[in-house]
Image (tube, rainbow, N blue to C red):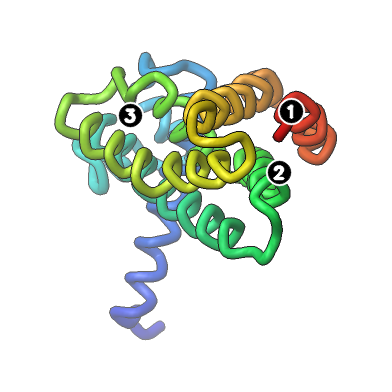
Amino acid sequence: MSPRTKEQNEQIREARIRQIRRAAADVYLARGLAFEIKDVAAQAEVGYGTVYHYYSNKFLLLRDLLEQAASAARELTDKTMAEALPARERLRLLSVRLLGLWSEERSVFILYKMASEKFHQLPEGSARALAVLFDDELYRPVADAMRECVGSEAAEETANMLIGSLVGCAGLWLYRSRSDLDAERMADLLFEGIRS
């Protein structure tokens, strides 16, 4: 057998990090911030030291998990907000797509849930940086599109209600490990209450 190439080693490293982040999201949903690195290692089916090799503590792991989640959410938000649709339809489509993404990538749901709680569970520096990132790149596009739907006065209040409702509804499914979340129906119900 020949030794692995640098590229092969990098692919293995990236796959292991994805595996650890996915396990961390599952463990966080089950235990909240009370989880420990050993819980993540058990969920990922890797050695305790393997997780520590990549993350020296759970807060660094959570920060990486949330930054990657923000990247996925930003890509989805940018793509959806660029659609040639009226603002209300873009917001409904974003809602459906977010619910679908949250069902597949629990870390993105955790990002939105923690944002709704001002990232208060994280160390202050991480909390502040993630709050700014969330507000600028994920919340602001929703509020701007909502402004087109309901006007300036009610835009932020309605954006808050939309995001909060999505987080609450999805949480009921995800915390119970259900996979039958009907994103279309949930979005339709929410948007029946959002009128121009």
Q: Which residue is mark 3?
A: 37
- The quadrant in which residue 174 appears is top right
Q: Is residue 130 above or below residue 85?
A: above
Percent from the top left, x then y, of residue 156? 48, 30
At a point 38% along the width and 42% down the height, the residue shown is 65
Mark 2 vs mark 3: in front: 2
Q: Which mark is residue 190?
A: 1
- The quadrant in which residue 35 appears is top left
* Labels 3 and 1: the sequence-earlier one: 3
In-image side of 107 versus 187 (left or right):
left
Instruction: Categorize mark 2 by other alpha carbons within 10 Å: few (<14), some (14-19), many (20+).
Output: some
At a point 70% along the width and 24% down the height, the residue shown is 173
Q: Which residue is mark 2?
A: 92
Query: Who is closer to the viewer here, 23 or 53?
Result: 23
At a point 40% along the width and 65% down the height, the residue shown is 12
Quadrant for the N terminus in the image: bottom left
In-image side of 174 versus 189 (left or right):
left
Percent from the top left, x then y, of residue 126? 21, 34
As measured in the structure, the alpha-carbon distance from the residue carrying label 2 to the one carrying label 1 is: 9 Å
Instruction: Categorize mark 3 by other alpha carbons within 10 Å: few (<14), some (14-19), many (20+).
Output: many
Disc 3 and disc 1 in contact, CB within 8 angstroms: no
Query: Who is closer to the viewer here, 38 or 33?
Result: 33
Quadrant for the C terminus in the image: top right
* Labels 2 and 3: the sequence-earlier one: 3
As measured in the structure, the alpha-carbon distance from the residue carrying label 3 to the one carrying label 1 is: 38 Å
Residue kind at label 1, given as amino acid type: Leu
Mark 3 vs mark 1: in front: 1
Query: Who is closer to the viewer here, 4 or 113?
Result: 113
Regarding mark 1 in the picture, which secondary structure is present there? helix
